[in-house]
Structure formats: C-alpha cells, structure tokens
Image (tube, rainbow, N blue to C red):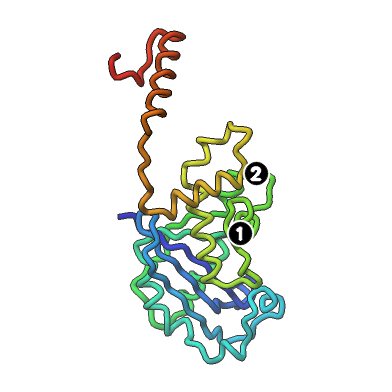
Amino acid sequence: MHRQIILDTETTGLNPEDGHRIIEIGCVELVNRNLTGRTFHVYINPERKVDIGAKSIHGLDNKFLDGQPTFAEIAEEFFSFIKSSELIIHNAPFDIGFIKYEFKLLKKKIAFSLTELKWIDTLELARKMHPGQKNSLDALCRRYGVDNSQRDLHGALLDASLLVDVYLRMTGGQRKLFEDDEFMTEVAVSTIHNKIIHNKKLPVIFANENELVEHQKFIELLKQKSGKCFWDEEN
C-alpha cells in the first residue's frame, strides 16, 4: 500500500525564524493514487499576530484564530495522520520549515523524528517539467485543466484538494503518449487525464461487425507492405 498525504499550510508570515507560526493545516489522503475520502483540516491559534500581508493572501485574522486550538493541542492528531506517509507539497521547503519549527517548540515531545519526513515538492517537479514557465499552483491548475474558480483566497484544505488533481495529472504517465501529436493540446490531454483518474469503472466498448471487417482490411494492407503483421493471430 502506497499512502501519500497532499499537504498545505497557511501561516502568519513568511519565515519561522522570525517567529511566524502555522495557522491552518489541510491534508488529503491518497492510497495507491486513489482518494480515500479521509482529510485532516484544522485552524490554529498562533499565539501571535498575523501579518497584514499574510492576511491579504488567506483572509484569516486574529479575531477568528484566537478561538482555535494551539498547535500543541493538535500536534498528536496531526502527527498520527501524516506519519509513515509520503508528503506531496507545493513549495515543500516552506511548509516543512514551519512544521519542523512547530514541533521544535513543543514542550511535550512527540515520538517523531523529523528525519523520517519524506516528501515530493511539486514546485520543483513542475520546474523540471515546464522550465521557464510559471509554475504556481494557479498556473498549474490552468495548464492541467483543474477548476480553481473557487480560489479567491488561499486556504489550506482547498489548496491541498487542488494539488491532488494537479499532482495526479502531472504524474499520470499519459501525457507522453500524445506529446508528439500536434493536434493534441494541453487542455485535451488534461481532459483525458481527468477521465482516466476519476472514472473508477471505464466502459468496455467492443468493435461491431463493420469495424471488425475494416480492421481485417487494415491488417491485410500491413501484411502487403511489410510481409508480416504481429496483430494477425495467424502469424
């Protein structure tokens, strides 16, 4: 079983070294690249003020956050959800830096080794796949045909849910089948990815009598040109 956790955080500011803290965590569980329906989502009292610049991005203010649990109060549950899993994060060094900082601040230590954290950074992956292009989450949503129309502000669970679709389409392995086809646009490829990923039971459509006749004609034509056809059961 391959368990992955798509993870995102929102914070009071940009750098934990300046004392900034996590204020929201959103996680979505994948097992063998399938959504399980399990999520982890929590708002957190950072025990400090939210920067104005950060608030303009996620819309979370201290009045709302003051009534939320502290990180220390949710740490055990959070650790239990992510342990022994591969984390999928967009711009992973940012989120991992904050997570490590929060665990470092805990007075009650959790049986958790930070060196055990394993992750894939989808920003780094996107830069390798699309060099010289914009690779923000919004840009990747547009590129892979993921609907992000609800993303007026950043939100940890919303962004993690969007990243699920982006990650599965980025790593689905279907794109290479069509990359040499000049008629295959990125939107068309994304549509195919979407159907493959989200349809658990794809219909099986058998060829009709006329199609079988045309197929046999095509095989005979191949045999005339090459002398042999591996599709022909008689060979």
Q: Position of residue 41 (x, y in %)?
A: 46, 76
Q: Which mark, by number, is residue 68?
A: none
**Rendered residue at 47%/46% (across/down):** 172
Q: Amino acid at mark 2?
A: Pro
59, above or below 29, in the image: below
Residue of label 1: 137
Residue count near mark 2 (Cα–Cα under 10 Å), binned few <14, some 14–19, many ≥20: few
Which residue lies most toward the front here? Answer: 210
Does 176 sit left or right of 209 as displayed?
right
Q: Position of residue 142 (x, y in %)?
A: 63, 55
Q: Quadrant of the C terminus?
A: top left
Residue of label 2: 131
195, above or below 92, in the image: above
**Rendered residue at 49%/59% (across/down):** 164
Q: Earlier in the sequence, mark 2 or mark 1?
A: 2
Inter-mark Cα distance, 2 to 1: 15 Å
